[in-house]
Amino acid sequence: MKICMLGAGALGCSIGGVLARGASDVIFVDRFQAHVDAINASGLKMRFGDSEESVRIKVYSSCEGLSPVDLIIVLVKSAATRAAIGSARPLIGGNTLVMSIQNGLGHEEILAEVVGRERVLAAKTYVGGVFLEPGHIVSGYKGKQTYIGELDGRLTPRLQAVVDEFNKAGLLTTASTNIYGTMWDKLLVNVATGAVCAITRLPYGWLYKVKEIEDTALAAVAEGVAVSKANDIRLVSDDPRYFWDLAAEGLPPEFKTSMLQSLEKGEITEVDFINGSVVRWGERSGIATPVNKTLLALVKGIENYQENFGKR
């Protein structure tokens, strides 16, 4: 299967690198030129626990001149989704599928508006990754589940083909008939640690040692659980602690959420699609979400500070 990772950040490299190791025909498209140059020159350096290896992958800085692929996996920052998939027209052939594995909610609707709902698959993953430097990442994929589904919940041959491709590479992947429930499950994992990690700047080995952080995270997840139940979303658990514990399962102490990694690079985070999603769904459902509103405000405040004062 020919696959394009549209966005080769920490998670895109982690998943795309593992797929390439499993003999999938993988290309990356990413705008970070130093990263593109490093991988093209020396391969993608992937650290797995105490071991490290280099994986050869061709990387491009744009989609211009490229040929259609079987599957486009979208892993750009949430705010860039529409522009990124719009620029990927050369990659889209008659049977090309498009799948988001981004954090948060709302990406599938954007993709469907651009390429047509009939092409779109939805997915959520618990695979992690940490960006170390251009061309070099830590991959946390072992034992971490990925779920992929059709938007209408059907089990189709094309869905199974993608699931099989992931499993062939060693990515533990399941075809889901409840993909929206799965998306909310992952959303609540992101709600548990994304913003508190970004605000405190603490990697997981220290984040999980602070009781006050844990209390705040559990309260934020509890709001998300209440909102999802009000909208008849089937979750894997109603216990906020389940999502707090799951967020760190199998990840190294140095792991940082993508939200923190974005801030460290001076970039806009996906907080609007994570805590912001809980807030928006809560407003529509008449459910108060004060903890998520506060976390949303604090992360956006940090973004604003970095944009206006961070480089002074």
Image (cartoon, rainbow, N blue to C red):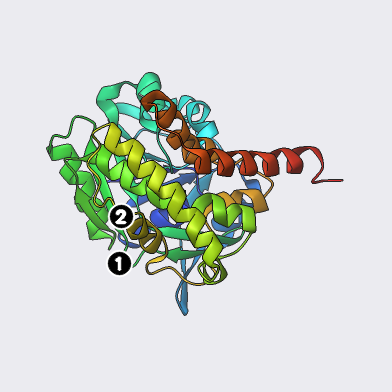
Give the residue number, with chain letter if any, for mark 1.
143
Name above or below for residue 111 compared with residue 105: above
Residue 239, which numbered label? 2
Taking the spot 44% from the left edge, 26% from the top edge, the residue there is 283
Q: Residue furthest bottom?
A: 50
| Mark 1 in CB contact with mark 2 (< 8 angstroms) | no
The residue lying toward the viewer, choosing from 26 and 31, is 31
Q: Residue type at mark 2? A: Asp
Q: Which mark is residue 277?
A: none
Question: What residue do we see at 31% from left, 53% from top?
Answer: 24
Please provide percent x and percent y for residue 117: 29, 23
Question: Could you tell me residue 306's position as x and y percent?
Answer: 74, 43
**Mark 1 or mark 2: whose residue is earlier in sequence:** 1
Q: Amino acid at mark 1?
A: Gly
Instruction: State whether residue 218 appears in this view.
Output: yes
| Residue nearer the viewer, 217 or 18 | 217
Residue name at image x 28 percent, y 28 percent: 119
View extreme (right): residue: 312
What whole-number distance in Å separates the C-alpha atoms at marks 1 and 2? 22 Å
Check disc 1: other Cα within 10 Å, few if <14, some if 14-19, many if 20+: some
Tag 1's secondary structure?
loop
- Image check: 214 left or right of 310? left
